[in-house]
Image: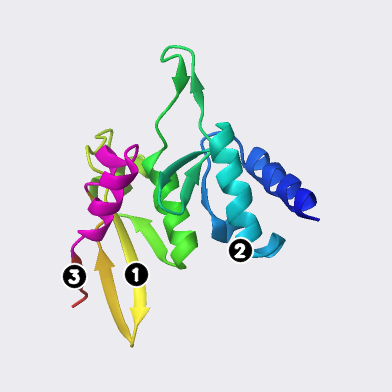
Amino acid sequence: MQQAIEQKILSRIYGNGRGWAFSQADFADLGARSTIDSALHRREREGVIRRVIRGIYHYPRHSKALGGPTSPNIDQIAHALARKFNWRIQPNGATAQNLLGLSTQVPVTPETLEAERRLMDAELVRVNEFANTALNPYDAERAIATIPRHNAS
């Protein structure tokens, strides 16, 4: 049974293609959390996937020029976090303008708004300072912990 779940996890990872970022929550429908965590940890040890930050993994693209895996796409990481924590996110500022084709400017630090309902309060969170630390799990976790939270007015 456990091998069947591991095969389904691998099929889902391969089906989403290289560059996909995901968490355990993306496989919650396949079985017990401990089984899924074990399978993801095994695949990480084998080098099939990479751990970006605690609980977020990435199926890397390979670059011939770099001779190895590429960095994860910050947008993919943001969406994986949103799925994991059940957030609704959307690009903001120059990031949104670039994605809509209204600007050719590519922002250095992508900006995403996250709207989360807590006791009828909507909070806006800027996901910044994340792009430069996505490869180092410890720095990325520290950066996420320091994201400023602003009350919506």
Q: Earlier in the sequence, mark 2 or mark 3?
A: 2
Marks 1 and 2, the one that precedes in the sequence: 2
Residue 33 circle label: 2
Sequence-wise, the earlier of marks 1 and 3 is 1
- Which residues fall within the magenta stretch? 129-148
Q: Is residue 150 above or below residue 143?
A: below
Q: Are marks 1 and 3 in contact (CB under 8 Å)?
A: no
Q: Secondary structure beneath disc 3?
A: strand
Residue at x 45% of width, y 42% of height: 51
Using the rendered view, name the quadrant where residue 105 is placed. top left
Q: Looking at the picture, how far across and down is residue 144, in whole percent?
A: 27, 55
Please state, as top left, top right, bottom left or bottom right, where the C terminus lies in the image. Answer: bottom left
Front tag of 1 and 2? 2
Residue 102 seen anywhere in this rendered image of the structure:
no
Report the amino acid beneath label 3: His
Taking the magenta stretch, the answer to whether it contains residue 131 is: yes
Q: Is residue 41 left or right of residue 54?
A: right
Q: Which three-letter amino acid code belongs to the residue tagged 2? A: Arg
Pointer 3 local density, CA inside 10 Å: few below 14, some 14–19, many at least 20: few
Q: Secondary structure at mark 1?
A: strand
Which residue is depicted at the point 45% across and 45% down?
A: 76
Residue at the disc numbered 1? 115
Q: CA distance from mark 1 to mark 3?
A: 11 Å
Please report the residue visible at 24 percent of the width from the left and 53 percent of the height from the top. Answer: 142
